[in-house]
Amino acid sequence: MRRLSLVALALLLAGCQSTEVQQAKPSLQIPAQWREAVGPSSSAEGFWWRNFHDVALNRYVDQALRYNSDVLTARERVNEYQARLNAADSALWPTLSAELGGTRSRSQSAATGLPTHNTLWRGSLTASYDVDLWGANRRTSDAAQASLEAQRAAAAAADLTVASSVASGYLTLLALDEQLRVTEETLKAWDEAFRLAKRQYETGYTSRLELMQTDSERRATRAQIPPLQHQIASQENALSVLLGVNPGAVARGGDINMLTPLALPGQLPSTLLNRRPDIVQAERTLVAADASLAAQRARLLPSINLTASGSLQDDTLAGLLDNPLRLWSIGGSILAPLLNRETLNAGVDVAMSQRNQALYSYESTVRNAFREVNDSLDAIRRYREQMTELQGQVDVAQETLRIAQNRYSNGYSSFLDVLDAQRTLFSAELNLAQVKNNLLQAQIDLYRSLGGGWGGLATS
């Protein structure tokens, strides 16, 4: 009865838990639909970037997923957490250790006075098992398993981020190429206009003012080429690093005019976010925190350990191996926390705070995911509208320039009309190239926000 009373006292003391840190309550509400008028589950597109139909882009993304440092680091982190799980699982099984030792001694015989030499071999075998009565070891293993799943999701997130970054960088490079092409074509037009103005000035047909105006526009256009070339070189260097190679030139598979903005599906259900790797990672991190909290609470309770050991010794190694164990023992122990209760309760408080942080992080991740999707959907719609208007402006500006040049050649208008028309066309073509890149970038953002596209849904 006295022993039972001691055990009951230990359980009572150990069961007292700290109330310093309270468990946070979830506050996340999942919206039923997006703000846009889009939005059945569909499978993720593992190779969504191929929908742009650019051979070079496909090759670069595949290369980055093999050699990018961030991707390789994330995959190695998965290996690390797999090893952590193996270590946590080992606590669920008994431990067994063996020891073998030998001594060689020299002594003097009391009877003869002569030295004698003796060899003594000793061997022992010890087994120990921590009885997981309250599930502390099991919950620790569960936490390690959830952490491993979180790291696998993080590796998938790294793949998605790198693929998106490569696609975004490559399309930006094509957009810069287009802006450089437009600038160089405009410069050719100004060079031709300057030659014409110079010839007309030399023949006395026009004034020197028109010659200077043409030369000014020509030089202003030429001055925009070096910054564009620098941006292209910088973009190539950044893309090379993403690919896991040294900075250098990057080959193109085509130009931005060959890329057609993709059609959105008729519906984009919010359940598509279930496949976002960062949401999966945050969810599994929360599961791991819950399991760690349960393990810390279990450590407030007494633990039971079973042990068994055996040993023998012999004058010869062969005899040591042949003989059975001569000495053995089997026993067990109960360890109840008494005076270190505050330390254990502090561990529970730490685990509770970490669990609350994981909950807040999960809710923030989900809300941010909905924001990113809504932003991308709105950007796609707005950029499409803008691109339609800019394309119309380019068409009008081209016709305006043609009319202005004809009127000037026939003497019906001044050269200022030609200057204005050429400036308008140049600006519109640059804006069109930039806005088309913005539209393609918004579609890449939508791919990333949805965790890898919207495969399997009907488009509209």
Image: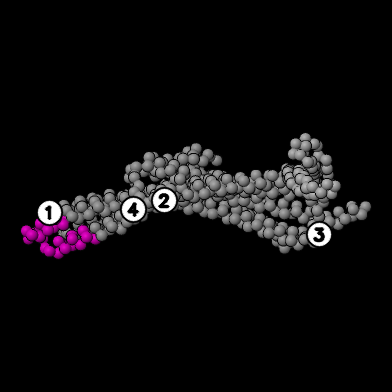
Rendered image quadrant of residue 12: bottom right
* Residue 386 seen by the camera: no
Callout 1–callout 4 Cβ contact below 8 Å: no
Q: Position of residue 450 (x, y in %)?
A: 51, 46
Q: Residues within 10 Å of mark 4 (few under 14, many from 20)?
A: many
The amino acid type of the residue labelled 4 equals: Ile
Q: Which residue is mark 4?
A: 232
Task: Pick the residue in front: 33 or 105.
Answer: 105
Nearer the observer: mark 4 or 3; the answer is: 3
* Residue 366 seen by the camera: yes
Q: Which mark is residue 338?
A: 3
Does label 4 or label 2 sit earlier along the sequence?
4
Residue 416 horizontal side relative to residue 155, left or right: left
The amino acid type of the residue labelled 3 equals: Leu
Q: Which residue is mark 1?
A: 410
Q: CA distance from mark 1 to mark 4?
A: 41 Å
Q: Secondary structure at mark 1?
A: loop
Q: CA distance from mark 1 to mark 3?
A: 105 Å
Does label 3 or label 2 sit earlier along the sequence?
2
User: What residue do we see at 80% from left, 53% from top?
Assistant: 335
